[in-house]
Amino acid sequence: MENAAYKEVYDRGVQALQSAGVADAGLDARLLLEFVCHTDRNTLYAHADMPVSDYARELYEQLIRRRAQRIPLQHLLGTQEFMGLSFVVNEHVLIPRQDTECLVEEAMICTMDGDRVLDLCTGSGCILLSIMCYKNGIEGVGTDISNEALQVARLNAERLEKPALFVNCDLFGQLPEEPFDIIVSNPPYIRSDVIETLAPEVKDHEPRGALDGGSDGLVFYKRILKDAPRYIRRGGTVLLEIGYDQGEAVSSMMKEAGFDNVETVKDLAGNDRVVKGIWVK
Ligand code: GLN
């Protein structure tokens, strides 16, 4: 077969993804084609008739087939942008979400250069490493129960040249009780019975352990808030990402745990997204 034209290859990709029920078929088809051909978004409009080599086309078709099986786009591309930085991802970590940028932005308001920052359930390390990239001299520690996830976090730290310490433990585990200025976490918070209703990309391809927050979705908040007082310095802030309907529950839990100035922050979509509180005891 002769070299096909860029736009034709793209159109076939869109069709295949549409029939597989992929939500953003056009976008994903374009991003995969750009990935394979090392092009950018202008190519589709400016050079629609550009020839695509047989090799690139075959590779593209292979990726389209995998995307049609509802493998997340980011697993095919290998990275996800978050806070303007590129993070390596795979099936062992939650793919960084735009919602979580709200948590990072809030955390950055409370963080001073040189602070000690702890990120629980760090996954790809996206939260901790973003803070370390945008503040100076942060002493960053991230923990995760999954060793495979920490391998990804360490790779991301290396790529971003940030000296974060990643520890394999369950939340605080046996971390020495040296106080942190800031504790952040985006823990698993989806109710177990809701997981089966999620898109196949999420329920079949993202780590269950990064999603499942137990029967009420609140298991991790309870555990974090029980131990956080031993790890936060006086005047330090704890910031937790939450689901849109967990604001009230998590704020009351934080108050009960003894935190002051407890506040819920909304994300850009207007949903409750972060609960934060200060430890003044
Ligand atoms: N902290 C990571 C993130 O926000 C992983 C969160 C998780 O696994 N629940 O992307």
Image: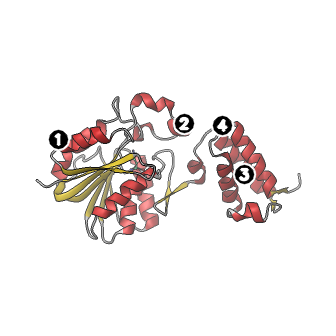
Instruction: Decide: few, some or many residues near mark 3? Use Cα within 10 Å; few <14, some 14-19, many ≥20.
Output: some
**Would you say 6 lies left or right of 94 here?**
right
Q: Amino acid at mark 1?
A: Glu
Residue found farthest to the left: 281
How far from the left and from the top, in percent, is residue 190? Answer: 40, 36
Residue assigned mark 3: 59
Q: Secondary structure at mark 4?
A: loop
Q: Report the front residue among 79 and 99.
A: 99
**Would you say 159 lies left or right of 219 here?**
right
* Numbered badge on residue 21: 4
Q: Secondary structure at mark 2?
A: loop
Image height check: is 225 above or below 46?
above
* Numbered badge on residue 256: 1
Sequence order check, earlier mark of 4 and 1? 4
Task: Kindly identify the residue that appears in the image at 43 percent across and 47 percent down.
Answer: 148
How far from the left and from the top, in percent, is residue 280? Answer: 13, 55
Sequence order check, earlier mark of 3 and 2? 3
